[in-house]
Image (spheres, rainbow, N blue to C red):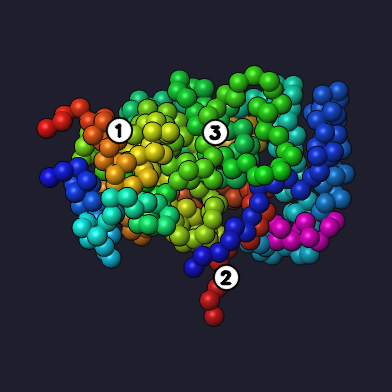
Amino acid sequence: MDIKTELKKALVKELNLEDITPAEIEDNEPLFGEGLGLDSLDAVVIVVLVQRHFGVEITDMDEGKKAFESINTLAAFIEENRTDHA
Amino acid sequence: MSQNRSWSSRSIGSRLQHHIFYTLIRFGGRNAAYVLLFFVVLWYTIRPSIRARSTAYISRRFPRATGREQFFHCFHLQMELGKTLVDRATAGILRAFEITGRAEDDDTLIRLHAEGNGVILLSGHVGCWQMAAMGLTVVNAPVHVLLLREQGDVDRHYFEHRSQKIPVSIIDPLGYLGGTLEMMAALAKGDLLCTMGDRVLGNDTNTVAVPFMGGTIRVPVSPYRLASATGAPIVVTFALRTGPGRARHEIAKIIRVPQGLGKQHAAYLPYALEFAAALEGITRKAPYQFFNFYDLWEKQRK
């Protein structure tokens, strides 16, 4: 399973997104505000999710800001920072 | 139900009034400022619009007070706030301020910090809350403070009177994602994070309703969700003013929020209830050090 698909599945599950399926999430759709409509507290879950599922910590504010734009940017961030590329 | 913020952290004084106080402190010391403060507070307390800001709290804290007694309580409350602000300015200008902690509280904080998940110091607008971070030197760790700076506010924090580097890291709650990423990063590094649990910024979306002083108020769930996500313990602490230029940290409660509680706010209610109980306890202990000058309480539905 590629990172984007895994991410989408994890988001729907961990954030209890009831009105949307992983397949319906667009790769370029903004995660916060308009778009997927997540809020600041959902970001808490995503930080943990990224750490738990992919072993990647988001500790730099500027990097995190860029990574949190969309599935595409988050997947790229994970790809860049994960230690096991299996 | 959403509602706009019903409070403001902006000072009601003008820039000139603040500078008069700062100058008086610089040349006459803290006590000279207290003398001027008495007359300023009396002037403000006479004004019904100023008294109205504390009516909701005073009528709950002193339900049997007559009109005259309410005036006295309001004056006392405003005076205590004024002294706290004078002390804060004195801390910055003359570096004359002492904040201590009970030995057992210091030990608790050191022990919790050693767990390595960071520590969330959860407080309220009580006593010397703006200088509470000064007293956290017992733990050798960076301190981050979630601090709202209103546009155009002329009131200075103690560290803004000094030209040296700010001793704490400020996180802006109006910043990207409410400062969430910075808070998570701070806790991931094992740092101390100071935040407030008694005011809601924005609408009611991320809040829960808790009983407080015979009514219901809404408090943010963010501290509890952060704790659940990171494993950081929550230390409910208040910095009570104990005298001129003096304050004492008191740990009122340690809250452990289990991990994996999910997204539903109701899951965090038990922990918000613990905070509300601690906050109510402090209003009984120090009734004139509760500085929320607006009506916190939800209106009862008919």
The quadrant in which the C terminus of chain B is found is bottom right
> What is the span of residues highlighted in magenta in the rendered image?
B46-55
The residue carrying mark 2 is B299
How many angstroms separate mark 1 from mark 2 (CA)?
A: 43 Å
Query: Which marked residue is nearer to the observer: mark 1 or mark 2?
Result: 1
- Residues at discs 2 and 3 both on one chain: yes
Residue type beneath disc 3: Ile
Name the residue at 50% across, 48% down.
Answer: B197
Give the chain of mark 3: B
Q: Position of residue B239 (x, y in %)?
A: 58, 36
The residue carrying mark 1 is A57
The residue carrying mark 3 is B170
Residue positioned most to the bottom: B302
How many angstroms separate mark 2 from mark 3 (CA)?
A: 34 Å
Q: Is residue B101 left or right of residue A14?
A: right
- Residues at discs 1 and 3 both on one chain: no
On whether residue B45 falls in the magenta region, the answer is: no
- Secondary structure under tag 1 reads loop
Q: Are marks 2 and 3 in contact (CB under 8 Å)?
A: no
Query: Which marked residue is nearer to the observer: mark 2 or mark 3?
Result: 3
Query: Which marked residue is nearer to the observer: mark 1 or mark 3?
Result: 1
